[in-house]
């Protein structure tokens, strides 16, 4: 078994730049709407780079705030697979823009990325009508 890599709290682990591929309104209530978003793009960081895919289910409240969850799949340029589950909150900041923050927990079977297993990360993101930018920081 490989020794755990020591990552200092607050270290930027990865940045994601992705495009919106689909958007589906799942439910409309008097309190807001539930929307599913799918994104595909690139992940890049000091330890790995590769593809990023994500499905996010957000509940947009009538006050302009939202909360949600996402499932993340990343495949590195070396063929390693990383999955993550995410929970977070955000706010609409303009007609087609938003920002938010939350936490993700990663899991992988890759021996060289085993330090990511059950690693909790803080996530910050911004979106516009068609793009998602995310940053993952070690906790």
Image: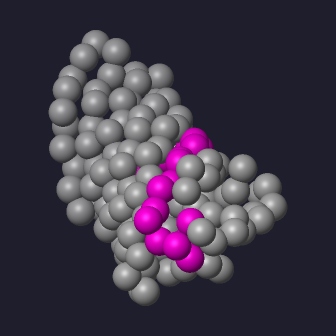
Q: What is the quadrant of residue 48 in the picture? A: bottom right
Q: Position of residue 94 (x, y in %)?
A: 48, 46
Name the foreground residue: 121 vs 6.
Answer: 6
Is residue 131 found left or right of 126 in the rendered image? Answer: left
Q: Position of residue 110 (x, y in %)?
A: 47, 71
- Can residue 129 be seen? no
Is residue 26 found left or right of 49 in the rendered image? Answer: left
Q: How many marks?
A: 0
Residue farthest to the right, as pictured = 8
Q: Is residue 94 magenta?
A: no
Q: Position of residue 68 (x, y in %)?
A: 42, 35
**Residue at the location (39% across, 70% down)?**
81
Name the foreground residue: 30 vs 72.
Answer: 72
> Coloured how?
one colour
Q: Position of residue 43 (x, y in %)?
A: 48, 73
Looking at the figure, which quarter contains the N terminus?
bottom right
User: Magenta region: which residues?
Assistant: 95-114
Q: Is residue 98 magenta?
A: yes
Residue farthest to the top, as pictured = 30
């Amino acid at each position: 078994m490989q020794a755990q890599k020591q990552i200092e709290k607050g270290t930027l682990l990865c940045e994601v730049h992705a495009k919106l591929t689909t958007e589906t309104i799942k439910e409309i209530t008097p309190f807001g709407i539930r929307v599913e978003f799918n994104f595909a793009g690139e992940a890049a960081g000091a330890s790995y780079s590769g593809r990023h895919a994500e499905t996010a289910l957000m509940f947009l409240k009538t006050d302009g705030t939202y909360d949600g969850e996402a499932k993340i799949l990343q495949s590195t340029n070396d063929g390693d697979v990383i999955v993550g589950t995410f929970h977070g909150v955000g706010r609409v900041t303009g007609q087609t823009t938003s920002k938010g923050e939350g936490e993700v927990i990663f899991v992988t079977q890759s021996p060289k990325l085993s330090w990511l297993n059950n690693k909790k990360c803080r996530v910050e993101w911004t979106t516009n009508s068609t793009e998602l930018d995310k940053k993952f920081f070690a906790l």
